[in-house]
Image (cartoon, rainbow, N blue to C red):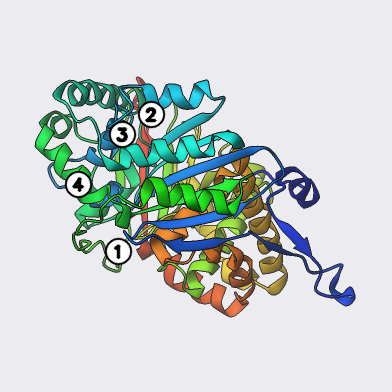
């Protein structure tokens, strides 16, 4: 995370309103408030509206409560494959016409598959809101599921796997690799990008069943963020989404992870890498607990920014690496997931440096952390966290706000949580942080993954 002046963030994003509590607190206290109107249609669709008239644009985001984690066994990568299928045509829009519709109206769009949801969004001029709501509803009603479309997208996804993982130095490290090593439950530990054999095995029956099961209004949330009129937006949402029938959603499988009792270490050979690398991951506390928020602050203290303790030790003092990267949830942020997760960081380092040297320096930081924790350290971490949160909320013309609103609607049935996050971090005390360090930053709760570059001169990394 790059540190930014809060004042510049406030002025640039235009997404939050601020006010002082009283004159005595003016220099100390600011509050932000994201406008949130939340309701549900009769078919179960969760709807979140958040006005922001600072620019004449609007975001429509559609989130479905299906991600990598609970895709069918023997169909790894299927959730991601299906994301691609959603752009292949619907009842009234032919192949690629959805994309053309957005782009020809001056907008941008994208979609992604994450651990616990698949999302689609468009950012368009405000006067195209009705068009985008109609288009999203059109593909929620039904896809153009054909063998040609499926075969085409199987090839596209398999090519992504080859380009981004199989034929790439450090391919999949550590964002794809670490969950498979750190977790034990298949739902959390399988190759979510997809095994090539599983991708080939997907058939039309699989696609049709997946769509009917998960792409239903009662398994989805939409958010509208930006410059729009409430009455119009509500009327259009009812008009286009209200008649889509709900379905019976299957019970969610058990995705829990057992308590890790022994440190785990693995080596991944990589003939394309030119330097050794390692990643360290610690299992996270349960979402929304005091320890969860404490871990968020520990992320700021240890990893984020030039003043982070691991950065100062490994980069500034030891010179083992040029940068420490990491955080909570490499495929998003600490708020937009809903299951087991890791706090993780990774580094690359020169062959003259050993893995033991790097890990000894890491242990020096972690082992001495409890004795350093005080209120001042926590307060500084809260400032960094707040800056990052505001940055996320304003990112991509406000898409960060749409993302959290949909995530909190899906996971917590409470998108207004977006306005209480800072308060939750402020409840964290030095005692809670020390308790969190003891339970979650212990060596027996961590997994270490080392990349061995298979150097021609057979130099060792350990």
Assign a secondary structure to mark 1.
Answer: loop
- Residue assigned mark 2: 459
- Which comes before the other along the chain, label 3 or label 1? 3
For discs 3 and 2, the disc positioned in front in the rendered view: 3
Judged left or right of residue 189, residue 103 is right
Q: Are marks 4 and 1 in contact (CB under 8 Å)?
A: no
- Residue assigned mark 4: 212
Judged left or right of residue 357, residue 170 is left
Numbered badge on residue 262: 1
**Which residue is at 41% across, 38% downward?**
134
For discs 3 and 1, the disc positioned in front in the rendered view: 3
Q: Compute the Cα span from label 3 to label 2.
A: 47 Å
Numbered badge on residue 86: 3
Q: Compute the Cα span from label 4 to label 1.
A: 42 Å
**Which residue is at 22% across, 43% downward?**
211
**Which residue is at 35% across, 22% downward?**
96
Q: Compute the Cα span from label 3 to label 4.
A: 13 Å
Assign a secondary structure to mark 2.
Answer: loop
Assign a secondary structure to mark 3.
Answer: loop
Q: Position of residue 224 (x, y in %)?
A: 53, 48
């Amino acid at each position: 995370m790059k540190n930014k002046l809060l004042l510049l963030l406030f002025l640039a994003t235009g997404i939050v309103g601020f006010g002082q509590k009283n004159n005595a607190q003016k220099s100390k206290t600011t509050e932000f408030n994201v406008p949130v109107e939340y309701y549900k249609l009769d078919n179960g669709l969760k709807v979140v509206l958040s006005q922001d008239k600072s620019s004449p644009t609007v975001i429509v985001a559609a989130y479905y409560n299906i991600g990598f984690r609970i895709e069918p066994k023997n169909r790894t990568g299927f959730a991601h494959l299906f994301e691609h299928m959603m752009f292949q045509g619907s009842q009234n829009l032919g192949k690629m016409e959805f994309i053309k519709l957005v782009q020809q109206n001056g907008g941008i769009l994208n979609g992604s598959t994450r651990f616990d949801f698949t999302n689609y969004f468009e950012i368009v001029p405000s006067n195209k809101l009705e068009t985008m709501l109609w288009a999203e509803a059109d593909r929620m009603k039904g896809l153009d599921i054909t063998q040609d479309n499926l075969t085409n997208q199987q090839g596209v996804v398999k090519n992504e796997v080859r380009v981004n993982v199989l034929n790439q130095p450090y391919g999949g490290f550590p964002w794809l690799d670490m969950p498979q090593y750190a977790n034990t439950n298949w739902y959390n530990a399988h190759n979510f990008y997809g095994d090539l054999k599983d991708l080939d095995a997907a058939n039309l029956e699989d696609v049709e069943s997946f769509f009917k099961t998960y792409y239903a209004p009662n398994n989805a949330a939409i958010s509208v963020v930006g410059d729009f009129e409430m009455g119009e937006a509500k009327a259009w949402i009812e008009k286009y989404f209200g008649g889509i029938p709900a379905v019976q959603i299957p019970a969610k499988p058990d995705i829990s992870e057992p308590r890790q009792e022994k440190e785990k270490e693995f080596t991944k050979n990589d003939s394309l890498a030119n330097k050794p690398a390692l990643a360290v991951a610690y299992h996270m506390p349960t979402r929304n607990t005091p320890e969860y928020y404490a871990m968020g602050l520990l992320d700021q203290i240890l990893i984020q920014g030039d003043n982070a303790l691991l950065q100062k030790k490994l980069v500034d003092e030891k010179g083992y690496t040029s940068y420490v990267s990491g955080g909570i949830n490499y495929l998003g942020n600490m708020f937009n997931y809903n299951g087991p997760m890791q706090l993780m960081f990774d580094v690359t380092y020169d062959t003259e440096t050993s893995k033991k040297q790097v890990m000894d320096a890491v242990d020096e930081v972690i082992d001495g952390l409890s004795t350093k924790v005080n209120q001042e350290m926590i307060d500084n971490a809260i400032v960094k966290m707040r800056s990052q949160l505001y940055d996320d909320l304003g990112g991509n013309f406000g898409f960060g706000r749409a993302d959290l609103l949909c995530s909190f609607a899906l996971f917590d049935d409470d998108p207004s949580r977006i306005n209480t996050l800072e308060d939750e971090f402020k409840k964290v005390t030095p005692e809670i942080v020390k308790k969190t360090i003891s339970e979650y930053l212990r060596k027996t709760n961590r997994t270490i993954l080392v990349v061995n570059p298979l150097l021609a001169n057979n130099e060792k990394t350990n």
